[in-house]
Amino acid sequence: MTSLPPRQLTAAASRYSVKTTNSSRVSRTDSSWQQEAWRFFKEVPEVRFAGTWVGNAMSGASLYAGRRADDGTIERAPDDHPAAEIVREIAGGADGQANLLGDFGPHLVVAGEGWIVVKPTADETSSIDGCDWRVLSTREVKQQGGGKLTAEFDGEEIAIPPYDPNAEPDPMAPIAIRVWKPSPDRHIEADSPVRSSLGLLEELQLLNAAVAAIARSRITGRGVLLVPKGTRFPTSPGTAGDAEDDLLEVFLEVASTAIREPDSAAATVPIILEVPAEVISDIKWMSFESHFDELALKLRDEAIRRFANGLEVPAEILLGLSDANHWCTLPETEIMTARGWKTYDQLTPGELVLTLNHETGLSEWQPLQKVNTWQVTDERMIRMKGKRHHSVTTAGHRWPVQTGHPNWRKRSWTTSGELVAGLTESDAPQFRNTFLVTGAPSASLPAEQKYSDALVELVAWYFTEGSNATRPGRKTPKVVIHQSHLVNADNCARIERALTNLFGPASDRLDKGGRYSSPESAARRAEARRLHAEHPDMPNNEIGRKIGVSGVMVGKYLKEDAKTRDDVPRWRKKLNSSGDMTHYVLNSAAAGVILEHAPRRVVSPDFVRALSRAQLELFIDTAVRGDGWHIGNTPVLSQKDPAMLDAFELAVILSGRAPLRHEHTSEGISSNGPRTKTQHIVTAGSTTTFAPQTQHITEETYSGTIWCPTTPNGTWLARYDGTVFYTGNSAWAISAEAVRLGVEPRLAIVCHALTTQWLRPLLEDEAVEDPDEWLVWYDTSQLRVQANRAQTALEAFQAGLISAAAARRETGFDEADAPTAEEAAQKRAPDQTPSADDEEETPSNVTTLPVGETTSIPDTLPASAAQPERVLAAVDGLIWAALQAAGERLRNKPACPRSERARAREIVPAELHTVFPVEQDMIDAWHLLDGAWVRVPEVARRYGLNPECLTGVLDDYARALIAARHPHTYEDTVRVLRAPCIADAA
């Protein structure tokens, strides 16, 4: 993590050194327990999981500069304020800060303490060009005599000098900042949840060892047989008939085999004894099983549960009972990157991956933000398998879906678990019309062509119908495209037309007299001529050995008419010996043009990504003409090498279709005997969705690694078992309780250290006014990300809960897209005179935002007669009853996790939606308002209102409240009844 240091770094660094190297502060702390805690981190999976989980969560937060307002909230500093500039430079920026915060997770969970060490770096002129930020453990930062600290930095110990106010500060001196969670009984000492669990973890280790011993023990598992004296094992082959094997020796051999190879037959097959028939009744079995075997398992589970309760995070996170952090899929599931398909362990944050913009329905290349992995045990997994789709995901895994009739489908979100539950409920028909997205047109295709159509065709012809080989004495591969003029005359005409358009007419001779054009070849030719002039009698072979070529080549070098190449691309065609095949041969210059985009006949993904929409279709059509066929209108391509299909598959994906990859294996006979032939096939399907039904779904449990990426769109293109699909869950969101209990307190500790030891001293050096008012603070909003953040932002803006700037940010626009003052004035109603304090983001201006469908709370409408108080009271009661019933149902839905349900019971049901966000589409999916308006017609007729109008207005209003997380008030009832259809009736 490297950052460019501010100019005032040196003086501030002196402060850090004296504060962190004061021997009287450091030496008196009791840190003996920390080494034991780190041992458990390495040896006990539950401890490692807890530290890693907190670190992953902390890395999802962002840092900013601000100051505390009178109401306790943190106001962000202006972007041009020195405090904002200093915080932006911490650890080199946002990526480095994410790593810094993430690294602190294990330190604060395990040891309760860590160090930030900042080491200035210098360029070749010894000028400071940046800083290297590291998070080090208490084992890596040590105190030596005289109050001096040393830090282990990349295996090298560096000294951190104490502050000397009378000495000239050293600009290259490293800085150390101690960050710790204070112990309640002694502030200077560190404390952590693992510290209080050391005894419990020791017990857990003993129980783990006991369970392992029970699993390995053949005696415990199978017992022993008591046999009469004289009983013997069956005689071994080749031994005398009366020979008897040593019973103990054989027994130990069988037992050791069972321990060494748990899956061997020795672990389960009983030991065989050969006994006389009359003594069989005397053989008895003695079991060594004890009640401790079962008790050990229970005690171990109880120890894990007790440790989870003491972690200062919701226990269900460690116990695997929370759906919030299991939004993942199997490790075999691949993701489409700009360099092709990759598994999770091949990914690098920042590289481009293909995502789905679920608002527009188009695919987009976006930078990968993070790769999240988890270890789970007996995790509930949902397998969906059909002819063109196969996926295995956790129950909480999110999906961008389309619902409804094919001609008017609506975009929404669901989870694997909700989909399964909906398909099994007879009263949930909407799930039978739920479509997963498997194909989407690309929004990232170039508007103008980068390559000619002729080049696109020739690359497709070459990778399907071409060959390449290196000719003797040449370094440049020979490129040939093959086609039968007897069977495919049209293909031959297309190839020749493309070659002519790209390289000109066919040539009779490719090299045109030129062979030795490279600088290396020219140098060898000059050296050969020099040696020959100085040593006329030296044989050509001897000259060749000296310059690294053959004697024949030396003879060509010595000719007066030595050939030189003009590097002009040329091609010619020739027939094979039987006359039924045309070979289109390209010289090295022409071959280089093709090989640049398809080395070894594997087309580069960069080439495919640069094609226009029309060129993608040209590439697909040409490839299928070369080595494919059509099933109806569906293109199919086959290749022996699966890598050669990747570019074709990518072209199909970017064209908006869903490819399907599979293998076909056939048995045959060759001159060398039987052989197995495998062909890899990609089908460019015309359908872009998959509607899972009950017969497609099975449930299973899984133990091992699960993973998911994080992308700006919250989606990614996945491939599993040859099928591709756009899926969600990329945003790693966790419950508000987990953030509040397990993440934010630790973020506050780090922010306090950065504030007091970094930000404020630097502000003092810059003579900034009131430096002690400014602080480093954290933003955890990304950890609580909702499934459809853009839609939620619009609804929150329309409800007056966020600013227009925030709405633009969450919907992908920047401030350059904001309307000017003139544009905003033009969009106001003609009779609306803006007041002096009108701003763009006031709720009265929400109608200026271009939104097709709105769920905003109805605003004040003109021309309405005041409704009688009794009407307002009746309608207010209807709304409250509907929200009350919706809240009761919401308590048992995924929006309210199990960990939150105790708190949910303390909240008035009618206001539960303001705490637990509900997506608009889930209102119907979870039946929140079912039966809510059955009494509306009766009330409407009683007061002379339009029943249909009142029902529609109340339903729209309640849905808007739930989606916008807005509470109902009596004053809102007045606004609701100002709807035109109600006002007219009144």
Image (cartoon, rainbow, N blue to C red):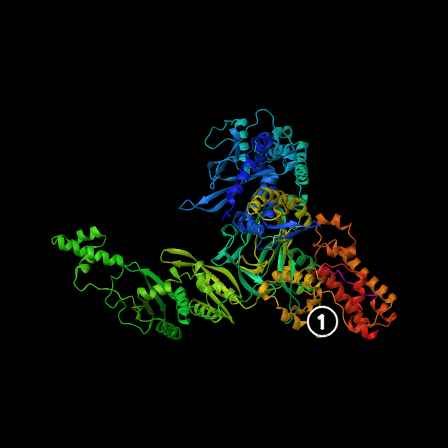
For numbered disc 1, what is the local secondary structure?
A: loop
Residue annotated with mark 1 = 833
* For residue 366, above or below residue 825: above
Query: Looking at the image, which is closer to me, 743 or 492?
Result: 743
Residue 396 in picture, x, y percent from top left: 64, 53
Taking the image as shown, residue 380 lies to the left or right of residue 528, namely right
Which quadrant of the structure image shows residue 808?
Answer: bottom right
Image quarter in which the C terminus is found: bottom right
Which quadrant of the structure image shows residue 492?
Answer: bottom left
Residue at the (33%, 69%) spot, across then down:
584
Residue at the (40%, 56%) spot, across then down:
674
Residue 181 in picture, x, y percent from top left: 63, 38
Taking the image as shown, residue 697 lies to the left or right of residue 977, namely left
Residue extent of the magenta highlight:
925-935
Query: Looking at the image, which is closer to me, 907 or 590?
Result: 907
* For residue 123, above or below residue 385: above
Residue 262 in picture, x, y percent from top left: 55, 38
| Residue 703 visible to an observer of this rendering | no
Query: Looking at the image, which is closer to me, 187 or 289?
Result: 187
* For residue 370, above or below residue 830: above
Which quadrant of the structure image shows residue 929?
Answer: bottom right
Q: Main secondary structure of the magenta part?
A: loop
* For residue 911, above or below residue 630: above
Residue 869 in picture, x, y percent from top left: 87, 66
Q: Amino acid at mark 1?
A: Thr
Q: Is residue 130 magenta?
A: no
Query: Looking at the image, which is closer to me, 729 or 72?
Result: 72
Taking the image as shown, residue 811 lies to the left or right of residue 468, namely right
For disc 1, the neighbor class at 10 Å (few under 14, some 14 to 19, many from 20) is few
Q: Residue furthest top?
A: 229
| Residue 528 visible to an observer of this rendering | yes
Number of numbered markers: 1
